[in-house]
Image (tube, grey):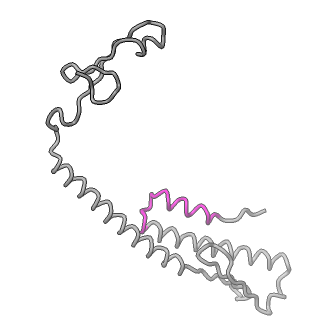
Amino acid sequence: EFCATPCGWRRCAGVARREGPGSLGTMFGAGYYSGTVNCRQPWDSESAVNTDDEYIKIGKLLDDWQNQAERQVEVNQRLVADLEQVEVVAESRDRCVRVVVDSNGALSDLSLSDDMYEYSPDELAGTILNLFVQARADVANQIHELTSAAWGADSPDVKATLRSYRPPRRR
């Protein structure tokens, strides 16, 4: 009896054999080749698995996965809304210089009072830069707290997010 597919395999009690020209042995110059493969069809014997139970388990797993994905979407949407609200204001002691850093770590506002003329140019630049670095570090701390609460403190996503808040290199 031959297998239902035109492969040339002969069935012998659920095991198939192929012998003769055109087999692997001919390709390597050895003449004939005899190989054995399992040629059983799914309908040849009863399934070892109760398919109804397996389908129920798979359905539950898919439902759990979908519910978890939906919860994570909600968490991430709240996180995005919270991150958009992050803003830090830093001000010099004499209130001459004021910087505002947004949730992206960018300088979004810089205010200088008329008293700025009391500073030398180097002092003014240094004060602005120091306030910016301080405010950006505070933003990074807030971002860390928010993302850790949403994703877990050890999450690689938290670490990847914080890499963009590294302080600038100073000369």
User: What residue is rendered at 53% in x and 59% in y?
Assistant: 159
Taking the magenta stretch, the answer to whether it contains residue 116 is no
> From the image, which quarter does the C terminus lie in?
bottom right
Q: Classify residue 109 by image quadrant.
A: bottom right
Is residue 157 inside the magenta stretch?
A: yes
Q: Residue at x 31, y 65 (%)?
A: 67
Closer to the camera in the image, 94 or 171:
171
Q: Is residue 35 above or below residue 90?
A: above
Say whether residue 53 is left or right of residue 75: left
Residue 55 position (above or below residue 141): above
Q: Is residue 65 above or below residue 43?
A: below
Give the extent of the magenta segment: 149-166
Q: Is residue 14 left or right of residue 138?
A: left
Q: Nearer the viewer, residue 147 or 4?
A: 4
What's the residue at 70%, 89% (across, down)? Answer: 95
- What is the total number of numbered labels drawn onto the structure image? 0
> In the picture, which quadrant includes the N terminus?
top left
Report the residue that reaches farthest toward the bottom.
114
Q: Position of residue 23 (x, y in %)?
A: 40, 16
Picture coordinates of residue 28 (x, y %)?
Answer: 48, 11
Task: Residue at 41%, 12% (x, y): give it.
Answer: 21
Q: Main secondary structure of the magenta part?
A: helix
